[in-house]
Amino acid sequence: KVAKILVSACLMGEKVRYDGNDNLLQHPLMQRWQQEQRLLMICPEVAGGLSVPRAPAEQIGTRIITCDGADVTTAFQRGAWRAQQLAQQQGVVMAILKARSPSCGVGQIYDGSFSRRLIADDGVTAAALRQLGIAVFSELQLDAAAAWWQRQSLVAQ
Ligand code: SF4
C-alpha cells in the first residue's frame, strides 16, 4: 500500500472555507503526489458537522469560538477525530494543511481577537495528527515537506 498524504480539502480546490471559497494550491509537487494517488483530502470543520458558509472561528484559550460568540469546540474536536481516523485507516504519514486555520494551522494560528494577530500554536486537527506521529506541514512549507518526503523514501529503500 502506498504511503498517503492527508491534505486540507480547501487546498485541493474544494469550496469548503468558512466564506465558501477555496485555497487551491497548484504546485508540481502536489500534482506529482496526486498522480501517484497519495493524496487524501478532508475538511475537518465540515467533517465535524459545520456548514458552508459558516461564521469564522478562532481559538480562545482551550475553546474555539466564532466571531458571533458561539462555542464550536465540539465540532472542531469531532473533525480532528475524523481526520485521525482517516489517517490511521489509510496509512497517512504526512499532512499538508492550510496555514493559520483554527483547524488546520501548523505552528501558527490566530490569537482569538479576530484581528489577524498570530500566536504560536497548532490548529485542532494539526495537533491531533501530530499526536499520531504524522509529519505535519502547511502549504507554505512545501520545501520542508519535500525534503522530509525525500528522506523517508531513502529510509524506506
Ligand atoms: Fe480548509 Fe481546514 Fe478550513 Fe476546511 S478546516 S476550510 S480544510 S483550512
Image (cartoon, grey):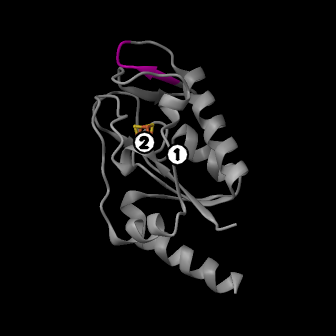
Q: Residues within 10 Å of mark 2 (few under 14, many from 20)?
A: many
Q: Which mark is residue 109?
A: 2
Give the magenta part as a residue range: 64-68
Q: Quadrant of residue 117?
A: top left
Of residues 113 and 86, the one drawn nearer to the viewer in this rendering: 86
Q: Which residue is mark 1?
A: 122
Instruction: Please say if 5 is above or below 10.
Output: below
Of residues 74 and 85, the one drawn nearer to the viewer in this rendering: 85
**Which residue is painted at 47% across and 68% down in the image?**
33
Q: Residues within 10 Å of mark 1 (few under 14, many from 20)?
A: many
Q: Is residue 123 left or right of residue 119?
A: right
Residue type marked 2: Ile
Query: Which mark sits nearer the N-terminus, 2 or 1?
Result: 2
Task: Decide if ligand 1 comes within 8 Å of the CB at mark 2.
Answer: no
| 144 falls in the magenta region | no
Residue 82 appears at what percent x and percent y? 63, 36
